[in-house]
Image (cartoon, helix red, strand yellow):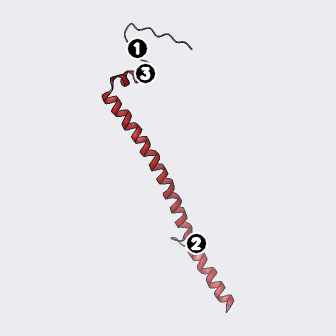
Amino acid sequence: MNKFFISVIICFLFYLFIKEDGLLEYYKGYNNFNQLQEKKIKLQSELLKIQNENELIKTDKNHIEKIAREEYFYIYPNEIIISLD
């Protein structure tokens, strides 16, 4: 009789772990959820940074000039650039 109950308990545990919505699937889903939460936080901070940059570009002429000079190497007419590398 004890062997029967032990067998039933072992089968039940296997069933809990292996079935489609068992504990293993739960932990996989939970880990996936945590990864997505971390990715969401990262993307939200990136979005905020882009929105701030966009606002600066819309309103601040000095910032536009800074970007044009640093990233696109624009210069004023008749301006001479001296590199000290």
Pinpoint residue 24: horizontal percent, then vertical percent.
Answer: 56, 67
Query: How far apart are labels 1 and 3 at the CA level?
Result: 9 Å
Give the residue at x 48% y 49%.
39
Disc 2 versus disc 3: distance between alpha carbons?
58 Å
Where residue 57 sits in the image (x, y, percent)? 34, 29
| Residue behind mark 3 | 72
Q: Amino acid at mark 2?
A: Phe
Dot 3, crowdedness within 10 Å: few (<14), some or many (≥20)?
Answer: few
Left/right placement of residue 51 relative to residue 35 reads left
Examine the image and state in which quarter residue 64 appears. Answer: top left
Say which element carries label 1.
loop
> In the image, what residue type sits under mark 1?
Ile
Query: What residue sits right under mark 1 in the picture?
Result: 75
Residue tagged 2: 17
At a point 54% along the width and 73% down the height, the residue shown is 19
Report the amino acid beneath label 3: Tyr
How many marks overall? 3
Quick check: 70 above or below 84?
A: below
Judged from this view, the residue extending furthest toward the bottom is 1
Residue in the image at 40% along x and 41% along y: 47
Q: Which mark is residue 1?
A: none
Q: Is residue 6 above or below residue 23?
A: below
48 displayed left or right of 17: left
In this rendering, is residue 44 above or below 15? above
**Foreground: disc 2 or disc 1:** 1
Q: Residues within 10 Å of mark 1 (few under 14, many from 20)?
A: few
Residue at horizontal 35%, vertical 30%?
56
The answer to which quarter of the image holds residue 67 is top left
